[in-house]
Amino acid sequence: MLNSSKDILWITLSFVVLWIGIFIGWSFYYLAMTLRDMNKVTSSLRKKMDLIDQILEIFKKKVETTANYLPPLIEGVGKIVEHFREKKKDKEEKKKKK
């Protein structure tokens, strides 16, 4: 079986090729697992970003709806404040007359 040093060289080279093949296979396996995990992370991140986008859209709609009611509300509060100012002014005038 081992007649010359050339046979030992070929056996050694075959073991080296075998170990290189195992190492490359192992490397591809871990690369594939890393890529799979990255895919899971990006899909999870995408879902969370969509959820945040939906929440912001709902908030935006609520703010727009509230903004539609805001001018009449401000006008009403302004009238109420003006009414109380007039009452206070009338009371002060009555006190001055006495």
Image (cartoon, rainbow, N blue to C red):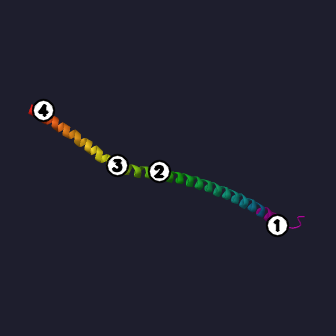
- Magenta-drawn segment: 1-16
Q: Marks 2 and 3, how far apart in space?
A: 18 Å
Quadrant for residue 13, please give it.
bottom right
Mark 1 vs mark 4: which is more N-terminal?
1
The crowding category of the residue bearing disc 4, from other C-alpha atoms within 10 Å (few below 14, some 14 to 19, many at least 20), is few
Q: Is residue 11 magenta?
A: yes
Give the Cα separation between the discs numbered 1 and 4.
120 Å
| Position in image of residue 29 (x %, y %) | 70, 57
Q: Earlier in the sequence, mark 2 or mark 3?
A: 2
Q: Nearer the viewer, residue 95 or 15?
A: 95
Residue type highlighted by circle 2:
Ile
Whether tag 1 and tag 4 are in contact, CB under 8 A, the answer is no
Q: CA distance from mark 4 to mark 3?
A: 37 Å
Q: Which residue is mark 3?
A: 70
Question: Which element is circle 4 on?
Answer: helix
Q: Quadrant of the N terminus?
A: bottom right
> In the rendering, which numbered label is found on residue 58?
2
Which class describes the residues within 10 Å of circle 3: few (<14), some (14-19), or many (20+)?
few
Residue toward you, 61 or 82: 82
State which mark lies toward you, 2 or 4.
4
Q: Residue at x 29, y 47 (%)?
A: 75
Residue 91 x, y percent position in the rendering: 16, 34
Question: In the drawing, does residue 22 fall left or right of residue 49?
Answer: right
In the image shown, does 23 or 70 lie closer to the viewer? 70
- Label number found at residue 10: 1
Q: CA distance from mark 1 to mark 2?
A: 71 Å
Verify whether residue 56 appears in magenta.
no
